[in-house]
Structures are given as structure tokens and as C-alpha cells.
Amino acid sequence: MTAPRLHVHKLRAGFGGKEVLHDLELEIAAGTVTAIIGPSGCGKSTFIRTLNRMHELVGGAWVKGRVLLDEQDLYASDVDPVLLRRRVGMVFQKPNPFPSMSIRDNVVAGLRLTGTLSRGQTEAIAERALRQAALWDEVKDRLDDPGAALSGGQQQRLCIARALAVDPQVLLMDEPCSALDPIATARIEDLIHSLRGRYTIVLVTHSMQQAARVSERTAFLLRGELVEVDDTRKIFTKPNDRRTEDYITGRFG
Amino acid sequence: MISAHTDRAFEGELRLLRERLQRMATRADEMLADAVRALVQGDAELARQTAHRDRAVNQDEVDIDEQCLAMLARWQPMASDLRLIFAASKLASNLEQISDLAVNICERADELATGGFRGPYTFIPHMSEVGREMLRDAMTAFLTANTDLAQEVLTRDDEIDDLHHQVVSTQTERIRAGDIDVRQGIAVQNVARFLENVADHATAIAEHAIFMVHALDVRHAGKRER
Ligand SMILES: Nc1ncnc2c1ncn2[C@@H]1O[C@H](COP(=O)(O)OP(=O)(O)O)[C@@H](O)[C@H]1O
Ligand SMILES: [Mg+2]
């Protein structure tokens, strides 16, 4: 399957009486990496979670507007959110492997939830996903070790492998490197470069430098509003909006 | 003006960078003034002393580049900060080359004074005034992010070109008439060319100011487009 484009139209979201995202309009081209930047609490996590319908899992959470994956509206009544989350995978801030589950089982954990596969098929899928996540060489001789035996950076790549194992089209990452050291971060960024094109990637990051390094488009979110979306190179050398300029140069009140 | 940076240490380094650029520009400008004064007054001693001052300007360039590099590494600046630091390093190179041109003028001044040449240096003092004014305005434009002033500097390039041609034709005429020695006439023409080059650097600094403010590279745009 090829990477889809995403179209966010008049998107509002919130918790109970509180609106967190206000009327967002965003077009994400197929197979690109888009970075979402903005101060803490501006709604980055809320936004990215509306893209695979994880937001609604929180009690009282609501969404209005549309998110189109190619032509399909994610919020149409005939969409099964569980199946949708296989097409739109998610990687979180803190690596969250099942600690006592083996490395191999961690990778195929998402597959187990649906359908039945032979041992051979599972092995093949695990290897492919681990290779894609650039982790295979480091773990191929200890696939039965528990997930907790890996370093933080390896655990994060394990989580990426787990997301890739179900063969998604979109990969969402919410500050995937915030708990990692610079080398582990560089590995993840290198991985993102290698996944570009095959997947449409949306990356939330609080590191401007990371956004500048890995994305081709950057969106600046401020208090639930999309202030500016542009080519990353443009955003970091000459943003259009004064608020973007103030934020990325650290002139923020 | 842009509001202050949240990190005051970074703000302090930016201020230091601006101060260094200003100090360097003042040094280069004063060298230029003294070089032309030495020439016009036939003061070989002043010419030699002035030429030695380019060491301080060279050192300024090294210091500024070092600071720019350290700031890029330390702060990984973005947007207008990034453009300022990028442009500052280029600007320092323009100033260094202006001081080299002042040295060239000093050498001609020394040579002409020692050879007993006493002018007249028609148009040269005027050229120097215009060139220095362009330099000072370009620096002000850069340090205060004033693009109107920068544009104004760009329009004065023609004035300098005209003056240059006038010096060349005046000296050629004097050589032809047998009023002055060929080599001395050529030395004066060289000085005019050096001053024209000074104006080119002032223009480049004005272009850095425009780039810094608008992220617009006007260097190779035709005069009309900019
Ligand atoms: N479960 C929740 N219930 C109520 N409010 C929430 C919840 N989660 C987040 N919020 C609020 O939504 C806003 C956006 O939060 P979030 O999307 O996590 O921002 P970011 O990821 O940019 O730091 C914040 O004001 C936050 O307090
Ligand atoms: Mg968040």
C-alpha cells in the first residue's frame, strides 16, 4: 500500500467544555514528514491523537470537523477505529514495550490482536519490522529476551518496529526522542529519513533542531491555533508570522 | 525593533557581536580617512603608520568569525538570529577587505609623497567622502535593521562610478599634456579604483542588511529589481 495524503479540515477538539484545538486546516502530502512544533500545552498531542482517533479514548473528549486519509473520512460512521489504528500507527514519548514480553512478541503484539498467523509468518513479519526499524542487527540473536532488557533508544525503535509490523500507511510520533540521548536520537532521526516516502509521517517535537533536521514541512501550533505551516527550510530561516519568529528564536514571553 | 531574547546570555552575545562589528567598521573607516589624508597632504610617515593599523582590523575579523562560529554551535539560532550571525561573518570580511584597500592607498601615498608628487588630487577627497558615508550608512542600516537606508546606499554606487571615471580621465589628460609623470598619474588612478572598491564593499554590507531583514538575496538582482 502506498502512503496516503492527509487532509485536516475545520478540525476542533477538546475535553468536556474545553476546546483545545480551534478550527485547524492542514494538508499533509503523501509520503512526507511533517513536524508539529509549539509550546507545551498548545495541543500538539491532542492534535496528533485526532489523526488516529486515539483522542476519543479519553472520557469526555470530543472531535468535530474532518480528517481525510486520501478520500476517506476517519470520522465517518462506518470506520472501525481499531482497524484505523492499524493503518495509522503511533509511537509515544516514552518507549512503552511490554517489559516481560519477548522482543519478538513485542513486535508482533499488534498482529496478535487480529487474525491468526503461523509461527513462520510471525517470524518473517518480526524480522521485516525490526529491519525497517534499524534494530535487527542489534537483537537478532536475542529475540526471546524480554523487551525491558533493551536500552531506552532500542526500546523506542522496538516500539517503532511494533507500529510498522501491522503494515501501516501513516506513522504518528509524539516526541519520540524526548527520553533519549543524542546518539539514540540520531538513530531515530536516521530511521525517520529511511521511512520517508513509504509512510506519511507526522512528528510532534519540542526540538526545533529536530524539526529542522527531519521534516520537509513544519506546522507551528499556538494555543490550539495553527499559526503557520510552510516548508521547513522557510520556517526556520524566514517564517512569515511574527509569532512563529518569536517562538523559534526563543523570544517568547 | 525585535523584542529581547528570553535567554539573556544569548542576548548579551548578540550585543557583543554588534559592538564588535561597529568597532571594526570604525577602525576601517578611520584607516581610510587617514590614508586619503596622508595621500593628499603628501605625508609618507602618516601613510606608513596608517598601513600598520590593518593588523587590528584583521584581528577583529578573526574574533568576529570565531564568535559567530561559537554562537552557531552553542545556540543553534533560527530565523532572524541565524541570518544576523550568517551575515555578520560576511560583513566582517567586507570590512577586512576595506582595510586592505586602505593599505593599498597608503602604499600609493607613500610612493607619491616620496617621489615628490604634490597633486592635485581632483575628485579623490570627494570620492573618499562618498565612499565613507556609504560605509557608515550601510553599517547603520545593518545594525538598526533599516532597509530604507540600505536601499539608499545601493543607489549611490553610480555616483562613485562617475567619480572614478572623472579621476581617470582627468589624470589621463594630465599625463597626455605632460603635466605629470605617467607612473604617478597611474598611481592616482589606482587610488580611485581602490575607493570604488571600497564603495562596492559598502554596497555589499547594505545588501547583507537587506538579507538580514527580509531574507532576500539582492546581490545579483539588477539595479532596477532591487
Ligand atoms: N485528559 C485531558 N483532560 C483535560 N484536558 C486535557 C487533557 N489532556 C490534555 N488536556 C489539555 O489540553 C491542552 C493541550 O494539551 P496537549 O495536547 O497535551 O498539549 P501539548 O502536547 O502541546 O503539550 C492543555 O491545556 C492540556 O491541559
Ligand atoms: Mg504533548
Image (cartoon, coloured by chain):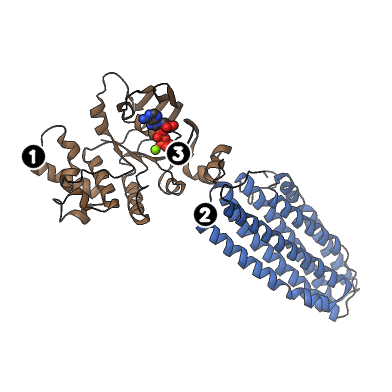
Instruction: Specify the subunit that label 2 lies on.
Output: B
**Amino acid type at mark 1:** Ser
Say which mark, if any, is on residue A118.
1
Q: Do labels 1 and 2 share a chain?
A: no
**Amino acid type at mark 2:** Trp
Instruction: Specify the subunit that label 1 lies on.
Output: A
Instruction: Specify the subunit that label 3 lies on.
Output: A
Q: Is disc 2 placed on a helix, strand or loop?
A: helix
Above or below for B104 versus A194? below
Work out which residue is located at the far top of the displayed protein and give it.
Answer: A77
Q: Nearer the viewer, residue B28 or B129?
A: B28
Above or below for B53 versus A106? below
- Residue at (67, 66) in percent of width and height: B96
Q: In which quarter of the image is residue B161?
A: bottom right
Of tags 1 and 2, the one toward the viewer is 2
Mark 1: give few (<14), some (14-19) or many (20+) Cα within 10 Å: few
Chain shown brown: that is: A
Q: Is disc 3 placed on a helix, strand or loop?
A: loop
**Amino acid type at mark 3:** Ser
Where the N terminus of chain A falls, by quadrant?
top left
- Residue at (21, 53) in percent of width and height: A149
Instruction: Find out if the beta carbon at label 3 lies less than 8 Å from the nearest ligand 1 atom.
Output: yes
Point out residue A48 in the picture as x, y percentages from the top left corner.
37, 34
Q: Is disc 1 placed on a helix, strand or loop?
A: loop
Mark 3: give few (<14), some (14-19) or many (20+) Cα within 10 Å: few
